[in-house]
Image (cartoon, rainbow, N blue to C red):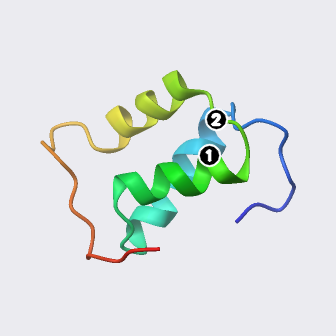
Amino acid sequence: MFQRAPKRLDEEGMVCAAIAALFEEGYDRATIELALIRHAPVDLDLLAQCYERLFAGEATPEPQHRAA
């Protein structure tokens, strides 16, 4: 998923890019969050900011129905 193994996911660009890439592959929000949290600790405020930035104006983003 990443070129380097971060100790904590706290870089906005990295978190937003990861969310966008996984969403484009059809994963839902719960699966994306679980995958990121399992990979490394995540700044939850940043996670929420990225969702707001990426999906502003959409009530609930709906992927292509792909599960982990």
In the drawing, what numbered circle is on residue 11? none
Q: Which residue is under mark 2?
A: 42
Q: Is residue 58 left or right of residue 54?
A: left
- The percent coordinates of residue 51 (x first, y second) are 38, 39
Q: Residue 10 at x, y = what percent?
A: 69, 31
Q: Which of these two is toward me, 22 or 32?
A: 32
What residue is drawn where x is 44% and y is 59%? Answer: 31
Give the vertical position of 66 relative to 47 (above or below). Answer: below
Residue 19: % across, % down = 49, 53
The reply to whether dot 1 and dot 2 touch (C-beta < 8 Å) is yes
Is 67 in front, or is 19?
Answer: 67
User: What residue appears at the point 21 percent right and 61 percent down from the top-left corner?
Assistant: 62
Mark 1 Cα-neighbour bin, 10 Å: few <14, some 14–19, many ≥20 = some
With 27 as the anchor, is 7 left or right in this view?
right
Looking at the picture, which amino acid does disc 1 mark?
A: Ile
Say if 6 sits above or below 3 in the image.
above
Q: Which mark is residue 37?
A: 1
Mark 1 vs 2, N-terminal side: 1
